[in-house]
Image (cartoon, rainbow, N blue to C red):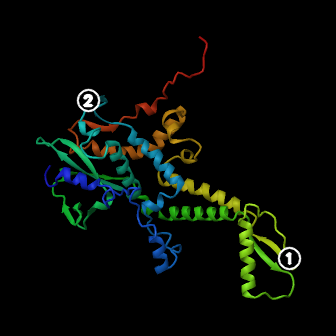
Amino acid sequence: MGLFNFAALAKYANEPNSAASGYVSPMNPPNTLAPIIVGDIFGPQDDADPDAPITRAEAMTIPSLVRARGILTIIASQPLVAYKGSERLTRQPGWLNRTDTSVSPSERVVATLDDLIFHGEALWVVERNSTGQIVDAVRMPFEKWRISPLGVIEVNVSEDQWTKVTNPKDIIYFRGFQEGLCTIGAPALHAARDIQRSVAARAKSPVPLLDLHLTDDDELTREEKSEMRREWNAALKDPEGSTAITPHNVEAKPLGAEGTNDFLTAARNGSRLDVANLLQLPASLIEGSTSTASLTYSTSDGKRSELKDYGLSLWMNIFNARLSMDDVTAAGTRIAFDFSDLSEVPDDGLSPVTED
């Protein structure tokens, strides 16, 4: 296919547990002690710059983002189709919906969409036949390609070898309509994680903070104060710890009891709205009240239209526009996702009975 050995590159790019694939087998998990070791050496990491880039792994711990991403991957469930004008070509390019690699075309789209969401750009390496037509394509993981200061794309073709792309027809480069969430979304996503920690802390100890106020002049030693705190903390975490008996000289005063839960609820809702805005999705779609499956198959006409027109179109048009260029398909033809089954509510035979 030119400069690259496509079969070898595809195998390397999709090898399990490699840095190229970004996939870690559950049979060979990463070192879970690493964060502890980092904390022991460098101290707590909670004071990191809130504007610093966030990793995809960190971002994917935010439930609203996981849901929003799941909604966007509906794109991958729709077939890519070649058209001439508005007419579907009788003979479709085979590589659009089949591949000789270990990654299905649907997975290829999902992984590419991930790169566009989190990094704002993506890259495919393609294989062509003797006439120059594309016969297969593989998505290169984001960390396995780069753009040099001179604007030249380089691909990591093996563990220690980077190769410059000298023939533009060896690749398909996708550029998103905005920068990736790992950079532009970092402040909002860091805040979302902080909100999650606050909610988890409140769930662990649902009662408000307490001031164990001494009402007499007896001075307790540091050890006695520590012991009193330990006993109260243990009692508050006890499933039957809703009632306490205070000594005659101790008054338990709640601190910050009013408004805290309301604030956390509002903060979580605001975090969902931030995620929706970052991904250009209608906020109503990630409220968590409707499953992704029902969005695909059984929502109302209005909801489906909102999903497609104001949620998916921006993202799928990145693929439609790039794959319709003349270096991918013949002049006069275009490639686009076929969303006809999402535009029409299927008749499941359970419609209400009506009279003639």
Instruction: Please tell me whether mark 2 sits on a helix, a strand or a loop.
Output: loop
Which structural element holds mark 1? loop
Residue 33 visible here: yes
- Picture coordinates of residue 285, whole percent (x, y): 54, 44
Give the quarter of the image for residue 209: bottom right
Please report contact status of discs 1 and 2: CB closer than 8 Å, yes or no: no
Point out the frontmost of discs 1 and 2: 1
Residue 104 picture location, percent across and down: 32, 43
Viewer-side residue, 170 vs 22:
22
| Mark nearer the N terminus (1 vs 2) | 2
Other-residue count near label 2 (Cα within 10 Å), few / some / many at <14 / 14–19 / ≥20: some
Tell me the residue at 28%/60% (across/down). Answer: 144
Which residue type carries mark 1? Pro
Q: Residue furthest right?
A: 248
For the residue pair 91 and 61, the one nearer the viewer reads as 61
Quadrant occupied by the C terminus: top right
Up/down of 155 relative to 74, above or below: below
Please tell me which residue lies in front, 282 or 161: 161
Residue at left 76%, top 72%?
A: 210
Direction front: furthest residue: 27
The x, y position of residue 41, in whole percent, is 46, 80
* Left-right relation of 328 to 253: left
Residue at 14% in and 55% down: 3
Q: Residues within 10 Å of mark 1 (few under 14, many from 20)?
A: few
**As rendered, which of 139 and 342 lies closer to the eye?**
139
Q: Position of residue 305 (x, y in %)?
A: 49, 36
Q: Is residue 320 visible?
A: no
Q: Which residue is mark 1?
A: 247
Q: Which residue is mark 2?
A: 89
Q: Amino acid at mark 2?
A: Leu
> Does residue 73 appear to the left or right of 329 in the view shown?
right
